[in-house]
Image: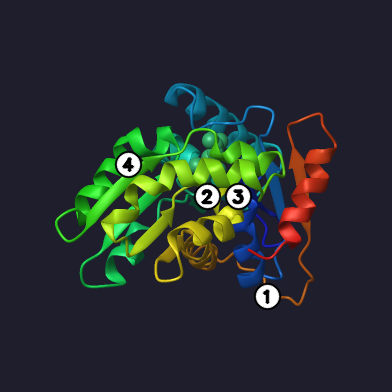
């Protein structure tokens, strides 16, 4: 039986989910969070879906059964598309949220939306994305853009400079003549590259990510389950990472504090 004082577990293939964790801490400051980055197995977004599914299920099962998490956030679009439906069936009583590309707000932001969706190859090929895209493709021009290799820059702490700029320009430039109205960051690593992406698409294109929506949904789910902590406790964040490299934990702390 979950206790109100138990922590919330936040999971990603690496450090990207820290962009979602930041919103959660802002919205639920009295909660304790465990953030787990699976950097040892990253990237997920270019692996076979079955492998991503297995890694995600193993981790979430461990959080629930061994670490006594009262709620789970899969702060990874790739892991969500591969495993969230199965996990909801496995643990129907646990508040569990995933993250998906924020296409809806990007479509509703203007009259003739033209939206670039940057995400991993797995996210864009899964059925979950196709269903989401189908909801809006009559009202909007949606351009899915797989970005294999992009999350690696964030994992390596490489958040600006020529290498990342060259990668982004090569990917995004073919869409600049589409008169884009929005860019959706459909991978939780990409908000850490928001400034670089902004510099390429220009100030008039709105940039969307799913962090706030996911944090709000988590708050709603734990409130509904009677598990929202409101006792004045100063919430703590504990970072864990599957990599042996101690630098990964230092980098996690740095990304958590960095403005994005
Ligand atoms: N952060 C993950 C996402 O939101 C993916 C990165 C990866 O492991 O490829 O999709």
> Which circle, 3 or 1, is nearer the viewer?
3
252 lies left or right of 131 = right
Q: Would you name the residue on which mark 1 appears?
A: 230
Vertical relation: 25 (above or below) 55: below
- Position above or below: 53 against 72: above
Q: Residue furthest right?
A: 246
Q: Which mark is residue 128?
A: 4
Whole-Å distance between the Cαs marked 2 and 1? 19 Å
The residue identified by callout 3 is 17
Alpha carbon distance from label 3 to label 2: 20 Å
Q: Position of residue 80 (x, y in %)?
A: 46, 42
Q: Secondary structure at mark 4?
A: helix
> Is 208 displayed left or right of 247 in the figure?
left
Q: Earlier in the sequence, mark 1 or mark 4?
A: 4
Question: Ligand 1 within 8 A of label 3's CB?
Answer: yes
Residue to which mark 2 is pinned: 94
Residue located at (78% from left, 47% from top)? 251
Which residue is drawn at the image coordinates 69% and 48% (left, top)? 35
Q: Secondary structure at mark 1?
A: loop
């Amino acid at each position: 039986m979950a206790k109100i004082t138990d922590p919330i577990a936040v999971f990603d293939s690496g450090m990207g989910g820290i962009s979602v964790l930041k919103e959660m801490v802002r919205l639920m400051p009295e909660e304790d969070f465990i953030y787990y980055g699976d950097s040892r197995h990253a990237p997920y977004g270019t692996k076979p879906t079955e492998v991503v599914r297995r890694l995600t299920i193993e981790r979430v099962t461990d959080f629930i059964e061994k670490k006594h998490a009262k709620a789970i956030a899969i702060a990874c679009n790739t892991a969500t598309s591969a495993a969230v439906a199965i996990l909801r069936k496995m643990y129907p009583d646990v508040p569990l949220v995933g993250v998906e590309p924020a296409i809806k707000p990007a479509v509703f932001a203007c009259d003739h939306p033209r939206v670039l969706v940057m995400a991993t190859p797995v996210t864009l090929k899964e059925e979950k994305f196709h269903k989401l895209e189908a909801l809006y493709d009559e009202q909007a021009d949606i351009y899915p853009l797989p970005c294999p290799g992009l999350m690696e820059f964030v994992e390596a702490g490489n958040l600006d400079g020529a290498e990342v700029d060259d990668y982004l320009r090569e990917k995004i430039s073919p869409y600049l003549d589409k008169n884009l109205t929005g860019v959706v960051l459909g991978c939780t690593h990409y908000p850490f590259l928001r400034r670089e992406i902004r510099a390429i698409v220009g100030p008039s294109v709105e940039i969307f990510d799913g962090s706030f929506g996911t944090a709000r949904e988590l708050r709603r789910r734990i409130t509904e389950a009677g598990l929202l902590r409101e006792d004045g406790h100063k919430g703590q964040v504990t970072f864990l990472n599957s990599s042996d490299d101690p630098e990964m934990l230092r980098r996690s702390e740095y990304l958590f504090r960095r403005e994005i």
